[in-house]
Image (tube, rainbow, N blue to C red):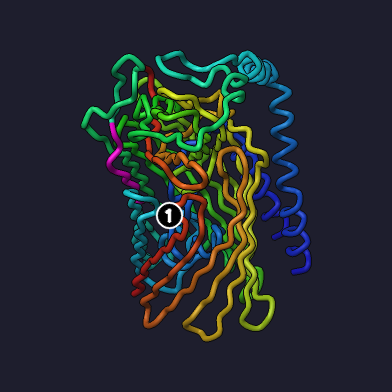
Amino acid sequence: MNNVFITLTLTLFLLPKVIDASIAVSLLINSPFLMTIQTKRSSYVGFDSFGGNNMIADYAVDALVASKTARITGKAYAYPSPALNGNTSIGFRVNDGPIDILFELYDELGQKIYSLNNIFPVGYNRIPINTNILGYELPVGSYYFLLLQNSEIVTKGKFGVTKGTS
Amino acid sequence: MIKKIAFLVSWLIFFVYISASDYQLISQTLGVSAEHISLGSGMFITGSNSMFSNDAYISNYNQTIDIFATQLMPDHTIIIGSVSYKLPTKTRISAGSSISVNTGFDITTQSGIDNEHIPTGETYNMSKYHYKVSVSQSVFQHMYLGSGINIIHQKSPAKGTGYSMDFGFKYFINTTGLLGIAVRNILSKDVNYANSRETLPSVIELGLYQPIYKNIIFSPSIMAIQSDQEYEVNYLYSLPIIIKPIETLRLMGSVSQKYAGLKTKTYFNFGTQLTLNGLSISYAYRKTDYTDARNQHFISLQINI
């Protein structure tokens, strides 16, 4: 019986290390795949181009000063919705001056998976959601988002992620 | 016996080591009953819904019906149910399904000078179905083996289907203690869409159920995940404690980890289970980040014959 416990203890401690080692070996063997991933990430320069403000020039947005009277009018929506392969953007309109907004994204278990705090200029703004931003592709499922100003929810919404080709 | 267990563990590690992505089955990410959520995952749960966590199902009852329903997030309903039947040969056959339906998503388009996102007025639902059939058998005096087939069907907005296989093992290390190993999503595990596919993550879970002092039971488990996703760690743990103040009542609490994106989050889960004359009611509580669903309550029901 002692042997059973020794085996169990060893397995409990060694199993994660065995799996980690296996993964490391696999990554080395498949290094071109790893390099492709790294290249994709480093080559990322901006977001999709639509009308309105697309959060491309972070330096310009950072230079803005939030106005106390600024507000979001209407509701924020994701487009495209459903989001094909996890690519979408959250659009919302800002009026009466630049606004300090905290954006939060949640998975279907209610867990926060991404947040962004920034000052958004007057006009129509978009927050992109994609593999470059998150570091991974959102799995198929339901996702919820909140836009908060001074810790108060100003608008919220949800979108689904599906797979396929456009 | 040690050699047999070591052989089995090696064999399972070999099978689980197949590259996988991360299609999320709600039954494998949330839990399959209020008791399961209270314990923070693990594989030593009562009721036939345990077929989703370990196929080597052990029960003193001949027939069991298990039902778990909850509204997890706004508009998101989950129902997980199963039945199990013990044959005269002591083979147990279980069949179950997990249904996840989230309604009221706006279909949007772009319009105006700024290409604003506007709803078209039409909506869509996200609906996911997971069916499973499982067989378990006592192979030696204290050992149970089980195997099951998962069928996954993403019904909308895009149709996708796939299947995978699970294996389970439980061994009585003494009169009250159990050792368990569960392997989920091996062999074929792609969910195929029209022009694309997503792959289920392969999982191997190792757990122990052992009374440590009078009516206090410790039931730790560790889950190793093989996935294409670059998680910050490749294994998650759960550390549950079960207290039985009286034979019919169990109080449960656990510390457990779940993935949130590529990071891990630690949760505290609490619950209770009351069993009277074969009828068992479980309740669980957990707290999440999302404002409108911060306090999550779960109830499940088992009927044992």
| Residue drawn at point x = 29 percent, y = 27 percent | B118
Q: Which residues are magenta?
A: B97-106
Q: Dividing the picture into quarters, in which one does residue A58 lie?
A: top right
Q: Dividing the picture into quarters, in which one does residue A2 lie?
A: bottom right
SS class, disc 1: helix
| Residue drawn at point x = 44 percent, y = 50 percent | B27
* Residue B212 placement (x, y as % from top left): 69, 76
* Residue B176 placement (x, y as % from top left): 61, 75
Q: Is residue B260 above or below residue B280?
A: above
Q: Which residue occupies the foreground of this view, A5 or B241?
A: B241
Crowding at dot 1, Cα within 10 Å, few <14 / some 14-19 / many 20+, comes out as some
Q: Which residue occupies the foreground of this view, A45 or B64?
A: A45
- Disc 1 target residue: B293
Q: Is residue B258 magenta?
A: no
Chain designation of label 1: B
Q: Is residue B274 left or right of residue A55?
A: left
Q: Is residue B49 left or right of residue B210?
A: left
| Residue drawn at point x = 65 percent, y = 83 percent | B214
* Residue B250 placement (x, y as % from top left): 51, 77
Name the dominant secondary structure of the magenta segment: strand
Q: Is residue B12 above or below residue B294?
A: above
Q: Which residue occupies the foreground of this view, B199 or B144?
A: B199
| Residue drawn at point x = 59 percent, y = 40 percent | B16
